Image: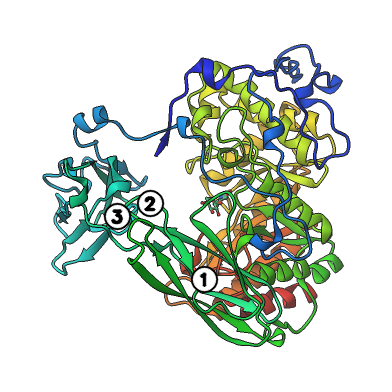
Amino acid sequence: MKLLSTSHDRSLSLTGLALSACLLTAGCGGGDDGGDPSTDGGSSDGGDGTLSTLPQPPLTAAPGTDDEPIAENPEFNTAQDFEVRREPGARLPEEMEVELTDADFEAGVPEPVLQIPDSIDPSSNQPPFFEGLTNLDVLAGDIVEIVYLPQDPEGGLPGMFPQELPQGATFTDNFDGSKTFTWQPLQMDVGVREFTVVAIDPENDQYRSSNSILIRTTLPDDPSSIPNVAPMLDEMFEYTARVNDPVVIRLKGVDLNGSVPTVEIPDLPAGASINQDPRFEEIFALKFTPVTAGEFSIDVVIRDSVDTSLTSTETVSVTVLDNIEFERTGARLRQLSANRGIKFGFASLQSFYHQPDGAIYADIAASEFDIVTPENSMKMDYINPLPGRFQFAASDNLVRFAQLHNIDVHGHPLVWYRQVPQWVEDTPAADREIVMREYIDRMLMRYAQAASVWDVVNEPMADDGTLRDSVWFEAMGERYIDVALRQARLSAPNATLLINEFDIASGAKANGLIALIDRLQQREVPLDGIGFQLHLFSSFDQYDELQTTFASIASRDLDIYITELDISVADGATSTEQADAYRRIVDICLNQTRCKAIQMWGFTDQYSFRTIFDPLPFDRAYQAKPAYYAIQDALSN
Ligand code: XIL
């Protein structure tokens, strides 16, 4: 599904809605309801750095009353100690979504998309490829079978993986270098869909080609010939919960024939309840509060709504541990770090209070950390997916949680090249400066009271030390960074403004960033610090270089934030090596007076964007790993 390329007129239509959205900020004003004198600079951002007044009415549609979340029924979440606001459905309005079209299908197999690392010269090492891929026309109920055998012009056997499997499809290894894609498209799949397999060069696993085909499914003349398959539950994971915590498990029935199944629990445990979500008929919330430890397994019957005798049964299970199992020796990280004058924090899983293990997640978060970054909920494609549509609830909820527990919020990110909504990509370059400024202003008007630190510009650098291409760079060149920072200062004069970047311990990218800082300072652009992401492996060995780069940032009168620390366990490495790496990073921060905070990108391996590498100090069952105690130790000494 991709967003319709909205026309200029539509995406930037002016609305009569000039309501201010000041739910969480005290000093609301400015922004979209106009008249904030602080933005009345009069001239555009010329050499003197003043910004022009934002247009009135605004160029992009402002949040309206529909974007204001309302309180949610507590039956649907594990939060106990703060009120959760209702989040919008994940669905965008139908009319804004378009399937791939017949025209796309007729245009033939899409060109492969190459990912070429700097070290590869494609003229001497050609990318891996597939021979004979074609688009396929099928009827719902047919079985599609495609054997994928990747080839490489230089010989050797390329690896491969499917980008995303349609529900019910399989991609199985034939143990001869080939894999077979098998899929029976059903009523739900009618239309044109893309299926992509990525081939990996035998010599360099970062050298890849993505190969798509389009599969067009139509209904047969006699739809009753399509087999009615048993409905199932949407994927469930394994969870650990704590005795006496509420556990809410969202059960989502899926029927590939397109009808909505019902979900039943024949043996509802005593005290448990099951409620249909008032907004989504296919979602049922099972809520129970285990009072003893043990493995809780509950059978769920998913019943077909067309043929009610057709069911499947699946078992969901949660491991419940006694309170004592979660106890950690020593003091909490937030207390130890406060003693050292820094903050210690994490990036929060979006909507953790909707997870079955949300209560223990919240409890550890509140006790261990005093600063939190929203992992995804403040990203532009999520919070402002369509012109004039804002999804604030997830961020509002995180802010409420943080305020209740005296946790500072680190806003992330205002301007980034990724997770940008389609409507922004479709906006003419000439309008993007105002789009960016209005967005920054709206976010800060709403959240700057709660969030004192902001990643204003995220990942501006390319590997070679030049500026990375992006929708923003394309429209404004380097000036987008000046404008973003100046707008942030205008909209939130007290906020700490950062540029956040990864892979900047040393080398061309670090040097490029420092050169950028020098130019920004020359132009008197407001900038308070640099965020170092530090997504590392335990084999990381650039500690000295990192320390030197910290010093060179500090010598420019800037603060340092470690913003996204996680340390993946490298091939063959142990949790002790991971712990040592955490210790060394904490030491480096403590040895640098300008280092203000250490934030990890999550805290439990259960929820990490690099979960396969177990990069965090708590395991999937919320047990503290050696890394946790190494951090404690480093903060104490
Ligand atoms: C990641 C999130 O962790 C994922 O859940 C999401 O799918 C993609 O983004 N650098 C950043 C973060 O600045 O915003 C990224 O977060 C990780 C890399």
Q: Secondary structure at mark 2?
A: loop
Q: In the drawing, does residue 247 fall left or right of residue 611?
A: right
Residue type pointed to by label 1: Asp
Of the numbered discs 2 and 1, the one sitting upstream in the chain is: 2
- The residue lying toward the viewer, choosing from 539 and 16, is 16
Is residue 94 in sight in this rendering?
Answer: yes
- Residue 614's disc is 1
Q: Nearer the viewer, mark 3 or mark 1?
A: 3
Image-based side of 33 in relation to 353, left or right: right
Instruction: Specify the farthest residue to the top.
Output: 42
**What separation in Å lies between label 3 and label 2 (alpha carbons)?**
27 Å
Residue 575, x across and y down, in percent? 54, 79
Q: Is residue 132 above or below residue 596?
A: above
- Residue at 85%, 39% in the rendered image: 494
Can you tell which mark lies on residue 354?
none
Which residue, given by chain and number where applicable, does mark 2 sit on? 259
Mark 3 or mark 1, which has the lower sequence index? 3
Determine if the C-beta at disc 1 is less than 8 A from ligand 1: no
- Name the residue type under label 2: Ser
Question: Would you place residue 195 above or below residue 441 in this image?
Answer: below
Element under disc 1: loop
Residue 23 in the image: x percent, y percent?
80, 40
The secondary element bearing badge 3 is classed as strand
**Quadrant position of residue 74:** bottom right
Q: Nearer the viewer, residue 284 or 214?
A: 284
For disc 3, the marked residue is 162
> Residue 618 lies in what quarter of the image?
bottom right
| Residue drawn where x is 52% and y is 71% of the image | 614
Q: Are marks 3 and 2 in contact (CB under 8 Å)?
A: no
Amino acid type at circle 3 is: Pro
Q: Earlier in the sequence, mark 3 or mark 2?
A: 3
Q: Quadrant of the N terminus?
A: top left
